[in-house]
Amino acid sequence: MNRNTVLLLALSSLFIFSCQDQPASDSGQSADREAALSPEDSSLYLARGKELALSTFSAMSSELLAAMQRGGVEEAARYCNLAAYPLVDSLSKVHEADIRRTSLKVRNPKNKPTEAEQQQLLAFQQLFEAGSPMAPVVRPVDANTVAFYAPIQIQPLCLQCHGKMGETLKEADYAVIKELYPEDAAIGYSEGDLRGIWSIRLRKKL
Ligand code: HEC
């Protein structure tokens, strides 16, 4: 593991774990509602969700950095698809989970939010705009499934591909991204901005 990777891992734990856990609020979550989770279940699924989000983020970050060192943004953009990471596959199998990232402004049309995700994105966006802390949440989905959501915030490294055109995002780099993702809407961000969420479906232990 090189120095950059270590730094990134440290940063990633900051961005996923910096906020204190808050109890799930009732506002606007009807789509994901079934029976409420017990406090014990909530902590269990929150812990599993965080672990999965962090492992996935770590794997992606190290591969992303390696690709950027090999061939810059162009090379990295081609390797960026979450679904392309074998680790996500194996984590999903081991934990019987479905791991996704989504956003109010997507780059990859496959990451478009579902209705439940859209509600959660808007709830986090409100907290973000109010300057309130954003903490991961879990919601019951059905008898077998729990949804985990956690905010994803922009770090300096992300700006090379999601930043402001002509400032943090180079036009030549963006041309490559636009070629791969013609409908891209995921630019114009600054450090600390809410970029999107992890959306992880966990299988309930019966
Ligand atoms: C080398 C360019 C590059 C860098 C650096 C980069 N991304 Fe992305 N990002 C992409 C590409 C390409 C996609 C679309 C592929 C996919 O589905 O993962 C994407 C997709 C995403 C998505 C999924 C939602 C969507 O818009 O499709 C999120 C969330 C995201 N990036 C956040 C980040 C964060 C946070 C960082 C910094 C830690 C980051 N990205 C760094 C290129 C990059």
Image (spheres, rainbow, N blue to C red):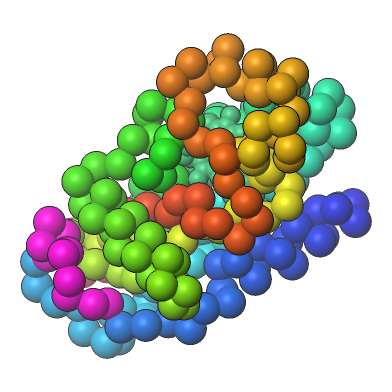
The residue lying at 65 percent from left, 16 percent from top is 175
**Residue at far bottom of view:** 39
Is 29 colored magenta in this rendering? yes
The residue lying at 49 percent from left, 67 percent from top is 50
**Residue at far front of view:** 166
Residue situated in front as seen by the camera: 156 or 52? 156
Residue 110 on image: x %, y %: 37, 29
Q: Which residues are magenta?
A: 24-33
The residue lying at 24 percent from left, 55 percent from top is 119
Left or right: where 168 falls relative to 40: right
In this orientation, does residue 60 appear? no
Relative to 152, is 126 above or below? Answer: below
Left or right: where 195 falls relative to 110: right
Residue 168 on image: x %, y %: 73, 40
In the rendered image, which quarter is residue 43 located in?
bottom left
Q: Main secondary structure of the magenta part?
A: loop
**Residue at far top of view:** 179
Relative to 103, is 205 above or below? Answer: below
In the rendered image, which quarter is residue 64 located in?
top right
Total marks drawn? 0
In this orientation, does residue 16 appear? yes
**Where does ligand 1 appear, by image quarter?**
top right
Residue 173 on image: x %, y %: 72, 23
The residue lying at 48 percent from left, 83 percent from top is 20
Residue situated in front as seen by the camera: 177 or 146? 177
Left or right: where 138 falls relative to 88: left
Quadrant, the C terminus = bottom left
Residue 163 on image: x %, y %: 64, 40
Is 105 colored magenta in this rendering? no
